Amino acid sequence: MNSMYKETVKSRSVAWLAALMAILMIACSDTQQVEQELPLGTPVTAHFRLATANSGVTTRAEAENMKSWVVIITNKADGAVENVFTKDNVGNLTEDVVANFTTQVTTGTKRIYSFANITLEELIAAIGTAEPIAGDPIATIKSIANIEAAIRTATFLPKGNNWTSANNTKGIPMSNWQDLENKSDGKTYTLYVCRMIAKVEFKLKNETGQDITVKNVTISDITSNESPVMLMPKTSVTAERDIKQSINLPMASDDASVSVETTEVKALKEDGTDAITLSADATTPTSVTVYVNESQVQSDYGLFRLTLTIDRGTGEEEELRYALLSDENSNWTWIARNDHRIIPITIDDYKLDLVPVDFPPIGVYPASVKEDEEGTFTCTFYAGGEFYLAPVVTRYSAGVPLTIDVFKAWNGTGADAQATGAATGEIHIGEERGAGAMVYGTSEVNHLRYADLTGYEKMVIEGTPGVQLRVLMNRLVNEGQVADGNLTEVNVTIDADGKAEVSFSGMEFVHLNAIKTNWGSPAGTITKISLVKPYSWNITSFTTPETTPAGDSNNTTAIYATPLSWNGKDLVLTGEFNNGVTGEAYHELTVTVNKGNGVTQTLLGRIWVKLAGGSN
């Protein structure tokens, strides 16, 4: 009985297994049928989703979103237009995917052109090869015989400089092209669009030791709003974060400039209503953002130039000039569409000057250098022969102010000590102090309570002339002793100019425990304590353009027997004039200032060198 039951169960199990296998085989057969590659030209259903290419940031401004879209589906083989889809007034869509649609297409390789914030009428005008069919822009697009050539050679005016939602409610124009292999029915494809303009973000930091008002930030050599760019990006965007583009200006190539109209773009309003105040004690940079057209440097000196217009609180405007360099390509010569370029700028008091050295005969005027409001140096020589131009970088700032918030508690006294938290301390600036009084720190001069000033070159103390000060540093124990050869106490007296300096030269670390007036000091007031970092500088490039800048017709090389040059080593430019020949030549000088801790700043000098007759 048991044997018969087991045989029956076994038979039923085999039957069920056979049935299950049959079901699975049918399911696999159906799956294979869905995935089966169909003959070329077979009508099938395709699903599409439209998305924006990521510009490298997590949040976007309203203007960077899609507000309308157009999709043109073509057969790559013959360029024939199969379908055109468009939708206007889709609102301020903030999602990456803003459109989903389904359509009938044929199998084969499709070249698909996608656009956002560009109307069909604007596309037809840009392509310019079709006679518009009244009231039917879709039919007009379909009537174009070779739409591939028409679209890929078309140009467009994105007018992206200083783009805002207020001055253009349609949103930033976007475009892209993609090749898709459509071989089966029911597939879903993602189409991407790429913004036709770029975003430049300046991150401004103030290290001058005083509040500064930034009146404007100006970047040069940007493609003007009246100069077109190509309608399509240089390369197809095939993924959301496929954000790297090369410039695609008319007849452009990656290694050759093109002749386009350029302009300068100001990030702030010229009337000063949105000027920015950078406080001296700010710890985080302030961002200023501006949209620009995709651009390639057109000027002979081959760099984008940046000018900051600032006011140091005097009511007078001052211009700071920079050359834009990047780690990617040394000389930053282009800005591509959809780029989000972040440019950190530290404002301090480094200034480039030129000192001329020549050897004129008796009775001839000596050489002179004059810097105009545009920051161009005009170097005038009155006699032929050999001459020199010596660049000099100076820093006018007294440094950053010493504050009590850097006075902390520490777990040790050496260079590797770590802060454990805030410490209670005193600072008396602007208050009269008598003999033996506290100015900074704590009266007990605790060796584990100090401000770490390591990395600074010196401290400048300003106040009443004659005040005597005790600067107590690097204490190993309370009441102190010599620490590894570093002095624990420096005594200084404020001089007749109201200043006293404490040098930190040669110190492995600088831990300021306290500042007190000396026991024999007259009463007086400390008005300011500043910390100054060391700096060094070197010439990083020097160029003599082959042609003069626009508007200047003087020959740039004929006046030299030996052109002005830099040997790559000495901090001096040398040249030699032909005797008896007058004229002028233009040069570009780039100097890099090393501000310590791996931080550098690039200064730009534009130089006219002139030989003119004259005697005294």
Image (cartoon, helix red, strand yellow):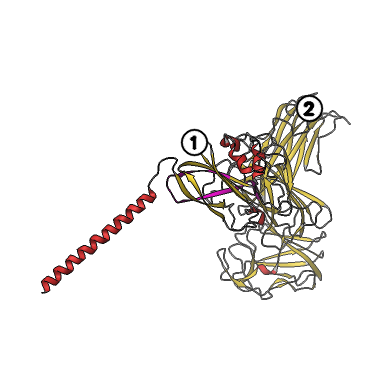
**Count of labels in the image:** 2
Sort mark 2 into few (<14), some (14-19) or many (20+) by Cα contacts within 10 Å.
Answer: many
Q: Is residue 196 magenta?
A: yes
Which residue range is magenta in the image?
Answer: 176-199
Q: Is residue 222 magenta?
A: no
Q: Quadrant where the N terminus lies?
A: bottom left
Left or right of residue 555, residue 450 in this image: left
Q: Position of residue 550 (x, y in %)?
A: 76, 34
CA gap between label 1 and label 2 equals 69 Å
Residue 503 location, quadrant:
bottom right
Above or below for 452 versus 72: below
Residue at the spot of label 2: 384
Tell me what residue is drawn at x 63 percent, y 61 percent: 454
Sort mark 1 into few (<14), some (14-19) or many (20+) by Cα contacts within 10 Å.
Answer: few
Q: Position of residue 4 (x, y in %)?
A: 12, 71
Residue 246 location, quadrant:
top right
The answer to which of 509 and 344 lies nearer the viewer is 344
Residue at the spot of label 1: 77
Q: Position of residue 425 (x, y in %)?
A: 68, 73
Tell me what residue is drawn at x 70 percent, y 62 percent: 282
The answer to which of 118 and 197 lies nearer the viewer is 118
Above or below for 334 versus 364: below
Residue 411 location, quadrant:
bottom right
Tell me which label, 1 or 2, sits earlier in the chain.
Answer: 1
Q: Are marks 1 and 2 in contact (CB under 8 Å)?
A: no
Tell me what residue is drawn at x 71 percent, y 63 percent: 281
The answer to which of 599 and 551 lies nearer the viewer is 551
Query: Which element type, helix, strand or loop, lies under badge 2?
Result: loop
Q: Amino acid at mark 2?
A: Gly
Left or right of residue 431, residue 164 in this image: left
